[in-house]
Image (cartoon, rainbow, N blue to C red):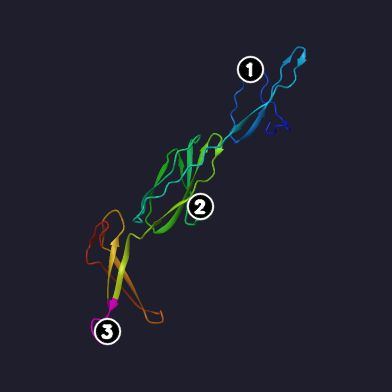
């Protein structure tokens, strides 16, 4: 029974053996009692004993090491008692609205390979024969654009000129070389209205990892 008063008790075994093996899938406390049956009738109920079936322990999600904002990073978590697999979820919201399960398996890590910049949040739970743990703590990381503008300025080369020079610096935030980086410029007047746009390419055709 799930009650120490044995309300709603269910007979789980009847036979000549003096033992019985439980195979429960759900956590909770269960109470047991036994009686003997013979040709002359039944004995009274024995003393009762109980057992508490536990879910897997909740994993700990470790901080994500991604200082450069790269799109390739690894999410890791602790192994836990009574777990046979883990479920990892990802969301772009810290409330995990619209969370998506991106991994389910026995491993304790998962490697991301993202190309689009955004901040992503993660949580993980453990799954075992007795059910699921609660959700772990959350961790997050921000994927930066592959090439980021770190400085920019514009100036008129001389008085009366109709030209506008735009100069700046970009940095390669990826873990590999990037080539033919295109830079787009949008020009606005003092009221914020768009008055023109243009583009060019970086002077250095190949920007190495971490290079500017």
Residue shown at the point (32%, 72%) measured from the top left = 185
Residue at 30% x, 69% y is 151
Q: Which residue, given by chain and number where applicable, does mark 3 sit on?
A: 162
Please name whichever residue, 204 or 133, is drawn nearer the observer in this view of the structure: 133
**Residue 25: percent from the left, percent from the top?**
58, 34
* Residue 67 position within the rendered picture, expressed as x and y whole percent measured from the top left: 35, 54
Instruction: Read off the residue under disc 2.
Output: 99
- Using the numbered discs, state the Cα–Cα distance from disc 2 to disc 3 in whole angstroms: 52 Å
Give neighbour class at mark 3: few <14, some 14-19, many 20+ (Cα, 10 Å).
few
Q: CA distance from mark 1 to mark 3?
A: 100 Å
- Please tell me whether residue 121 is drawn above or below residue 3 in the rendered image: below
Q: Which residue is mark 1?
A: 18
Q: Is residue 56 magenta?
A: no
Which is more N-terminal, label 3 or label 1? Answer: 1
Picture layout, residue 81 above or below residue 179: above
Magenta-tinted stretch:
154-165
Label tally? 3
Identify the secondary structure beneath mark 3.
Answer: loop
| Viewport quadrant of the N terminus | top right
State whether residue 136 is above or below residue 129: below
């Amino acid at each position: 029974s799930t009650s120490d008063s044995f309300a709603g008790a269910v007979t789980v075994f009847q036979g000549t053996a003096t033992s019985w093996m439980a195979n429960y899938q759900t956590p909770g406390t269960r109470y047991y009692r036994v009686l003997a049956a013979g040709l002359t009738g039944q004995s009274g109920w024995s003393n009762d004993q109980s057992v508490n079936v536990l879910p897997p322990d909740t994993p700990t999600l470790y901080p994500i090491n991604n200082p450069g904002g790269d799109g390739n990073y690894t999410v890791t978590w602790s192994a836990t008692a009574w777990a046979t697999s883990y479920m990892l979820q990802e969301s772009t919201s810290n409330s995990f609205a619209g969370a998506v399960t991106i991994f389910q398996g026995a491993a304790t890590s998962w490697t991301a390979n993202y190309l689009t910049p955004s901040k992503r949040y993660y949580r993980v739970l453990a799954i075992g024969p007795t059910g699921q743990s609660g959700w772990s703590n959350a961790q997050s990381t921000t994927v930066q654009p592959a090439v980021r503008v770190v400085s920019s300025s514009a100036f008129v080369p001389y008085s009366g000129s109709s030209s506008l020079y735009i100069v700046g610096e970009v940095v390669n935030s990826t873990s590999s070389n990037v080539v033919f980086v295109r830079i787009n410029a949008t020009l606005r007047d003092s009221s914020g209205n768009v008055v023109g746009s243009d583009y060019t390419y970086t002077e250095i055709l190949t920007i190495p990892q971490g290079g500017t």
